[in-house]
Image (spheres, rainbow, N blue to C red):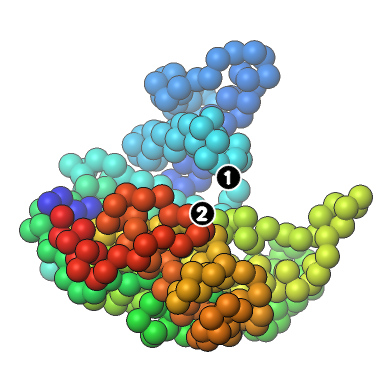
Amino acid sequence: MERLQAFKFELMPTGEQARKMRQFAGARRFVYNKALALQQENREAGGKFIGYVGMAKRLTEWRNGPDTPWLKDAPVHTQQHALKDLDRAFVNFFEKRADYPCFKRKGMGDSFRYPDPKQMKLDRENGRISLPKLAYIRYRNSRMVLGEVRSATVSHRAGKWYVSILTRREVEQPVPHGPVVGIDVGVARFATLSDGTFIAPLASFKKHEQRLAKYQRRMARKVKGSSNWKKAKARVQRVHARIANARSDFLHKASNEISKSHAMIAVEDLQVRNMSKSASGTADAPGRNIRAKSGLNKSILDQGWFEFRRQLEYKTAWRGGFFVAVPPQNTSRTCPSCGHISADNRRTQALFACVRCSHEANADHVGAINVLERGQRLLACGETAQSGRSKKHEPAEVTRAIAA
């Protein structure tokens, strides 16, 4: 079994190396924006979409032209990959998976990628990596890099440089072990499992919200572009980085523990983007309860539900388990005892009380049980999960389905 895995480390560059990395990131951003502007001009003129091959020819002209000779100072592969990223962004737009590509701004997501493993050398024992036109750069060697190096991505965030090393290696086909579980995510409880256990939320943004607001106010009082404004901006960025790092660490630990101890995991197929849309509405049709909805949106985005699901999916596959996403309709309104569906079954956020059979339980626990049942139906017999209730499979049937 082939496994692709990325190992991310903080770089410790010299002053000259940091200057070059800023230059390389700027050249990549320039190529991306110039290609996007050319696509827009060509589109307005009624021309056909320019593919990657056509753009690569123009890149050669830009690097050899008199207007932008400084592009030659940066590696060509990093700029070619910028064109590939733009081409992929347009494909996603044409297939209605994403919005129209937008221009990249300086200081927002500065990065560049080395796709050729033959141009890189990784010194695992001494914690350093050699990259084209940068020579050897030391990194904080927090763990051993496993596998054959395939590519490396250098990125900048909150004043620090990082390298993400993508590797490929062969591993034995894992055998799934452990019970089956359904997961219901929420705000009061980050994740409730069908066995009755739950994971309390971290809410990293909420913990640092007041501190972040204080530094943002200080930044707003400074003259934009001044030295003091840049210092205040750097402090705001560091707070954001701390929030993101804490959330990432929490999600990785939670997803790793769940995927390691369960053979099958069922989750709700939540559309987080739709759930967190603003309720402000328009001038003609203003929304209602805007402040309450805004607070709910902030709490939803603070949990990182989509990233949690993404990590669960690939980590379960790494361990040979089964992962299934089921429709979320009525999972918190269906009684797991009698199958009755009603909005009155959940009159409060925490309590589920069936109006037909009087079954009472925690509402999130009930949702996790229903999610597990729908996941079992999908895996056992390929049945499309509906909001109604069908025949409940016995544990032996589910075990046979997983083994198959």
- The residue that appears at 58% across and 45% down in the rendered structure is 104
198 left or right, relative to 172: right
- The residue that appears at 35% across and 81% down in the rendered structure is 195
- The residue that appears at 38% across and 77% down in the rendered structure is 194
158 left or right, relative to 326: right
The quadrant in which residue 56 appears is top left
The quadrant in which residue 5 appears is bottom left
Q: Which residue is mark 2?
A: 109
Pick the residue in front: 143 or 256: 256
* Residue 360 visible in the displayed image: yes
Crowd band around label 1 with a 10 angstrom C-alpha radius: few (<14), some (14–19), many (20+):
some
Q: Which residue is mark 1?
A: 104
* Residue 310 visible in the displayed image: no
View extreme (right): residue: 284
Q: Are marks 2 and 1 in contact (CB under 8 Å)?
A: yes
Query: Which amino acid type corresponds to the residue marked 1 in the rendered image?
Result: Lys
Location of residue 201 with respect to 129 vertically, above or below: below
Q: Position of residue 273 (x, y in %)?
A: 59, 56
Pick the residue in front: 355 or 170: 355
Q: Position of residue 11 (x, y in %)?
A: 34, 65
